[in-house]
Amino acid sequence: MNRPTRAALSALSLLSLAALTACGGDSGSGSDADKPAATASQEQQEQQATPEERLQQLAITQADAPGDRKVTEPDDEFVFAKSAKEVTVDKPACAPLALAMNQLPLGEPQADLTRVVDSGGANIGAFTYVTLTTYESGGAESAMSGLSKAVDACGGGFTAKSDENTSAYDSVTAEKPVAAAGDESLGFRSTLTFRGVTHTVHTQAVRSGDVLAVYFSVDGSAIANSKPSDAKLPAAVVKAQNGKLGNGKLG
């Protein structure tokens, strides 16, 4: 099946449409010495893991995917930008939104990775992007705060540009997260217009300790074929990834 044109892709809030085709206790009980050997060993391994290794352990896998969904890695061919440094925004306050909706890390990350989950079933053109980012202590809280402020400040929309692409968003509106979890959860939707057709995409961010998960859903097939779309975040996918974030808590 044919991939959509680059012009269609550049209209999306995210151009990493890789697969976008028509297809503490007290001293008496809280010490490591009192814990089962297996638990203490697991905690030591997590503490010794690099930020990249920790995210690999926390990321949703094919075994975690609900239903007949497939989990893959994004294709660099369709990324909106290769790094946050390449992105400029006409309204600086909206920069966190541009990064979140284009699978780019917020703030000052230690490491990040993205997984792509298809919709399964008949609508194979809809995808959910799951981006995990880990930070030094306090970094995730700062990133989450900046994202929340951006939602409040950018209701009238904004335009983001990279070296090769431009994405214009008509509106941004806060909404209830489909599956609240972790220490903080934030949800919002955004609209964009391409070839006279309006599309709605949805984003949710979940902070669990110093790990931030950002979920973004888009119906790339509908956008490429000029059909109106409203790509809801699948609660089952969000819950599956949220369920693994408990191990991401550092404090």
Image (spheres, rainbow, N blue to C red):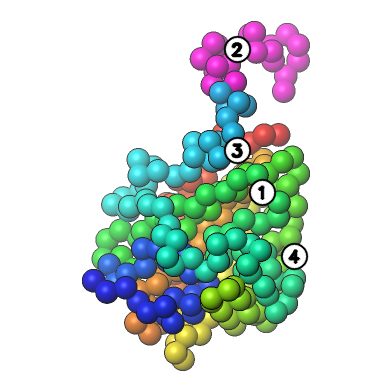
> Given this view, does label 3 or label 2 mark the residue nearer the observer?
3
Question: What is the secondary structure assignment of the residue under circle 3?
Answer: helix
Kind of residue at disc 1: Pro
Residue at x-position 40% and y-position 71%: 219
**Residue 35 numbered tag:** 2
Q: Which residues are magenta?
A: 24-44
> Given this view, does label 4 or label 1 mark the residue nearer the observer?
1
Return the disc, 4 or 1, that comes first in the chain's sequence: 1
Judge from the rendering whether residue 8 lies leftward or rightward of residue 53; answer left or right.
left
Mark 2 neighbour density, 10 Å: few (under 14) some (14–19) many (20 or more):
few
Kind of residue at disc 3: Pro
Mark 4 neighbour density, 10 Å: few (under 14) some (14–19) many (20 or more):
some
Return the disc, 1 or 2, that comes first in the chain's sequence: 2
Residue at x-position 49% and y-position 65%: 79
- Residue 155, given in percent of the width and then of the height, sits at 68, 77
Q: Which is nearer the eye, 86 or 156? A: 86
Judge from the rendering whether residue 89 lies leftward or rightward of residue 74; answer left or right.
right
- Residue 23, given in percent of the width and then of the height, sits at 27, 67
- Residue 44, given in percent of the width and then of the height, sits at 59, 21
CB under 8 Å between discs 2 and 4: no
- Residue designated by label 3: 51
